[in-house]
Amino acid sequence: MTETPKSREPKFEPARADILPVFSIPFLRGILDIDTELVTESARELISIISERNVGNTSRDYTTYFDEDIRTAMHEFEWYKEFSDRIKDTYISFISGTFEEPVDHLNRNDIHLFSWISRYEGHHQHEIHNHVHSHISGTWYIKTSPSTMPIRFYSPNIMSNFSHNAPDHPQSREDMPNIEFTGVAGVDSEMFVHPMDGEFLMWPSYIMHSVPPNYEETDDKYERISLSFNLKHRDIIDNNETGQDMSYGFFNDTDQR
């Protein structure tokens, strides 16, 4: 008869394994060495016009986004022309180097740059949103201070993170100064970037983000000036001559629809 082995104390024995940091989202962070004091003067000038047009409307009195005439007037500044060239070149470097997108068919004028200035004071904020009809979005920080509120990014995996019940602990990383995360190591739910003068960020346009208001008393008069932008480019279309060509211009004629 075979003797039954005696019971033993259970032992915790997970298999040896490594955590793989996969499906990461590339962000670009850098410095634009353009005279921010000159840009600050232009920004205040343009926003003052916006403020007069939108007295009492705190959702519109701080940004040129909604006023096309003021937004495009910015294009005539010499500093903006330099910004446009530099940011388009940076965009090309980013999408070709990171995503290996073909760009050799492009000129600078094939890249669409939509940009606007925002001047936040203490009560201003921007609710959570992302940017449609765009490939890469970004912000250049023109004037900041120690009390400047961060830009807050939300992980696109946040719903799947929820199912893991991961707590939102504050996290920091030595290689990412002035950035805070919430979540646990390897499972981020949010990222808070505290910008500096002259710094810019670029990210895929689908990423949700927001800017919280500043309700705290500060020693300095709260002012946060930024220039945000969306970028996309004319792409190559394959297999587009497979039938009889026709213009869809008739969609502008309501009588024909």
Image: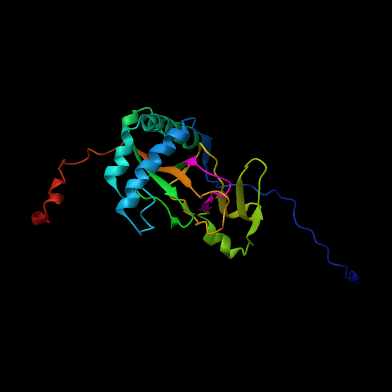
Image coordinates of residue 213 in percent, x first then y, are: 49, 57
Left or right: 69, with 180 as reference point: left
User: Is residue 64 in view from this perspective?
Assistant: no
Image coordinates of residue 233 in percent, x first then y, are: 35, 37
Q: Does residue 122 belong to the magenta stretch?
A: no
Which residue corresponds to the image point at 8% horizontal and 56% vertical from the top-left?
A: 255
Q: Which residues are magenta?
A: 141-153
Quadrant in the picture for the N terminus: bottom right
Left or right: 157, with 78 as reference point: right
The image's colour scheme reads rainbow
Placement of 108 over or under 189, stated as above or below: above
Image coordinates of residue 181 in percent, x first then y, are: 61, 52
Left or right: 173, with 124 as reference point: right
Q: Does residue 152 belong to the magenta stretch?
A: yes
Which residue corresponds to the image point at 83% horizontal and 66% vertical from the top-left?
A: 10
Placement of 80 over or under 163, stated as above or below: above
Of residues 166 and 14, the one nearer the viewer is: 166
- Where residue 241 sits, quadrant-wise, is top left
User: Is residue 130 in view from this perspective?
Assistant: yes
Of residues 245 and 50, the one nearer the viewer is: 50
